[in-house]
Image (cartoon, rainbow, N blue to C red):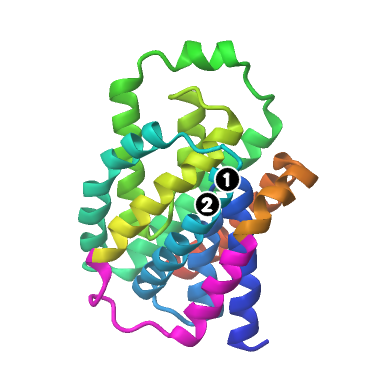
Amino acid sequence: MTALVLALVAGAVVGLALGGLGGGGSVLAVPVLIYLLGFTPARAGTASLLIIAVTSVTGLLAHARAGRVRWRTGLLFAAAGLPVAAAAGALSARLPAVLLTVGFALLAALAAWRMLVAGRRPAPSTTARRGRARPTAVRSTTAGAGLGAVTGLLGVGGGFLAVPALVSVLAFTMAEAVGTSLLVISANSLAALVPRLGTTGSLDWTVVAPFTATAVLGAWDGRRLADRFGGGTLQTAFAVALLAAAALMLVDALR
């Protein structure tokens, strides 16, 4: 299978994940770029941030049209992570490739576990969400900063962390969390991308461009796909793929 075909297929999968689940796509993008398309871990992180930033903005527009984005709260949540994302993005270029690979593999395994647990757990009632969400100031700032660190260091959007945080910490509905997560991902990805530019070498645009194009197209259809098949079904499918990617990366890094 040629690099172009792989990039097109992988981009569609990443876009569907971002558009339908509000996250998870970038955790698949990095191992695909490394193991199927020949990128180094540092360049894969940079390319992933570029792809995720463009795709998240596209998905954000689709959810905004449906009234599923809470702009003020989402911007405040994102603002806490922006300086951390920029600092972590600059630091990542100086870390050993094996450390980034192991860290990413552990993060992918965590993302898969959270998706599997969330897919089996019944959605909390509005009253229950509000009860958990009262002490929001410190927790929301901490969650936003932590998400920014993950985004900058490992080149992922962090939506798989943002969605549950928005639901449990800020009492969003799942639909609002998915839409607002894309706002947070867009801001953090752009903040983490800027300090990486020019530090990891030139990107292969014959791969990055088609990857991004199909990811954008997939993001438009992601929300409708989730409505048709159910978020739980999509979460389980992506969780299995993430577990396989995590195992592959750990074996490769530790051998």
Which residue is pictured at 41% across the width and 71% down the height? 47
- Number of on-image labels: 2
Whether residue 235 is visible to the viewer of this picture, yes or no, is yes
The residues tagged by marks 2 and 1 sit, at their Cα atoms, a distance apart of: 6 Å
Q: Quick one: 123 or 101, which is closer to the camera? A: 123
Q: Main secondary structure of the magenta part?
A: helix
Q: Residue placed farthest to the right in the image?
A: 228
Please tell me which residue is depicted at 44% across the width and 17% down the height of the picture. Answer: 133
Residue type marked 2: Leu
Which disc number belongs to residue 65? 1
Q: Is the residue marked by circle 1 packed among few (<14), some (14-19), or many (20+) residues within 10 Å?
A: few
Q: Is residue 107 above or below residue 253?
A: above
Question: Alpha-carbon neighbours of circle 2 within 10 Å: few (<14), some, or many (≥20)?
Answer: some
The quadrant of the picture occupied by the N terminus is: bottom right
Which of the 4 image quarters holds residue 146? Answer: top left
Report the span colored magenta: 195-218
Residue 59: quadrant of the picture: bottom right
